[in-house]
Amino acid sequence: MNRTVRLTAAALCAAVGALVVAMVLGGAATPRIIPGLPDEGTLTRWMLPLSKLGMDVSGVLTVGLLTAAAAFLPNDKGLLGKQAQSYVKGASWSALAWAVAAAVALVFSLSETLGAPVGQILAGNELTSYASQVPQGIALTLVVLFAVAIALFARGAITAGAAGGLLVFALVTLLPPALTGHSSSSPNHGLATTSVAMHLLFLALWVGGLGVVCVHALRGRPLLDVAAARFSRMALWCFAGVGVSGLAAAASRLASVGELFTSNYGLLLLAKIVAFCVLGFVGWRHRGRTLPKVSEGEPHAFLRLALGEVLLMGATIGLAVALSRTAPPPVDTPVDRAFELLGYLVPPPLTVANLLTLWWFDLFFAVLAVIMAGLYGAGVVRLARRGDRWPMGRTISWYIGVVILVFSTQSGVARYSPVLFSVHMTEHMVLSMLVPIFLVLGAPVTLALRALKPAVRRGDRGPREWLMVILHSRIMKFFSHPAIATAIFVASTFVLYFTPLFAAAMEEHLGHIAMTVHFLLSGSLFFWVIIGVDPAPYKLPYYGRLLLLMVTMPFHAFFGIALMSMGSVLASSYYDQLGRTWGSSSLVDQQMGGGIAWAFGEIPTLIVLLALGFQWWRDDERVARRADRRADAAAAKSGGTGDAELDAYNDYLAKLNRRDRAAE
């Protein structure tokens, strides 16, 4: 235990030391104070970054403890072992510290915002308004509430599923403060917001996981080889995610490579890049040299490299906090409301050439498409190497869906979608009614179940077992019920567009991502019920699927007619701010979008009918072959033909023949 305390103290000292040095060198510790203007004071200037450092450290520790309990240590048919339960209880205490640090940061953040000493802040009543009305205050308030909830629920968690749910909740809790910082005010705020979120999530899993595995080794707990090997596999993905998201974040804030060397922000970013590269080298050494020794029973081999890596990670967190306190280099951006909302100026008039050439990079969906294509291809390759056959049609279908997804989210369609409602509706229809059809026909779950290996330990849960648990969970049974899936597919469209949700989603990049992801998920869920190849909790007969399709698709036509008949513009305040000067009016464009929604349903309906008819025919063939095999088996046992009616008729003829012979 003493060694664990010393490691924790050393990591904290490294983080605080890096924070102090970076703030001094970056100028955040000694800002220029103009006489006559409000000044928050030295206490706030230092306590705000220190409290945010406390938030980051306790949040990362919470993520690490929950990750170790849910994924690193084996469980027995979903029940956590004794050591895993102790880590979940430890996460309860670290989450409580997380909430306290966030509450302290809330106070000092208001002090900085108002330029008033903290004593004056505590004596006034501005804190309540700040916590409930200002985005930065709301973000910190959410962290306090969510962290307290994690602390309470973690006290009674005894299953791997509960630990996994708390882990997801903890990762979500990390996001609000980061998404209301420099990323939200960056010129390319869409790229900056997505990259910061990805960077933070991957870094928390990586740093927190390593810290807990080190504690596991220091305390001499069993199954270190299993925990280290599983962490190493996860760390490889985290390293790639941190690298990609970090490059994207830097590109969204720096106008040129030269600013890396000429600005305080760039120099701190360079220091963080160096630390990242060193961490990657240490991780490579772990995989190549340390893990084999750990599997042979040498825990100290792991500690020799891991302890230094933990200290370096602590320093990296300190650099990250200092980086968030340092203003990026100023960028000359046009004074234009459309640029503030979109991250780019209103594009030129819509033409086919512009749709094909004016591509707009969306990091979230680019990474999603790469992961979807890569994992599916890896599964097909694994089956081929094993000698198993995978239908080529499913592979082609999957990659057609991925290609359409990329074109819809990265091409000129993505650039014009926030500007023209008609293009937005086209993107909506494609993502909810065309892409899911091809993805569902690709049978990704069946491929994963065949390609993934079962857990080595009996009763433990690896990726394959977790996939089976999700498929058989109550939540999946509820949402995959044909009535629920259909209701989500139909009703969510009306709820989104005929309530203020649409305007709110259009004005925020994260709202746009959430809206697009919903289109994909709701469409995939519905078409999984209709033409899904993967195993599902409910299997409708083919005539039931056909009836459900015929009943559902007209609702999109009704939705389109409703849009065409409206006399007012949806999200009019948003479209008015863009100041588009070309093309038809917003109302006419909206009516055109309604026409697209009304007519588009015929294309996916035809594709689904063809797929459904082919599946029905194949199913009849399988039933016929199965019946033939049973008949052949019965014939082999009884000496008959295997056809019950034909055998009965033959027996009748034989009886008549015997009776005729007896009469003769």
Image (spheres, rainbow, N blue to C red):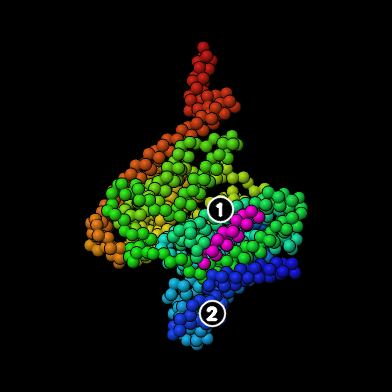
Reply yes or no: does residue 3 show up in magenta. no
Q: Position of residue 426 (x, y in %)?
A: 33, 51
Residue 44 is marked as: 2
- Label 1: how many Cα within 10 Å (few below 14, some 14–19, many 20+): few
Image quadrant holding the N terminus, namely bottom right
Provide the residue designation for mark 1.
240
Question: Residue at position x 27%, y 53% from top?
Answer: 349
Q: Position of residue 43 (x, y in %)?
A: 56, 81
Question: Which element carries disc 2, helix, strand or loop?
Answer: helix
The magenta segment is 264-282
Q: Up-down: is 111 above or below 340? A: below
Reply yes or no: does residue 271 show up in magenta. yes
**Residue found farthest to the right:** 297
Q: Up-down: is 600 above or below 222? A: above
The quadrant holding residue 570 is bottom left
Type of secondary structure dominating the magenta stretch: helix
The amino acid beneath tag 2 is Thr
- Is there any visible trace of residue 316 in the rendered image? yes
Q: Position of residue 442 (x, y in %)?
A: 47, 42
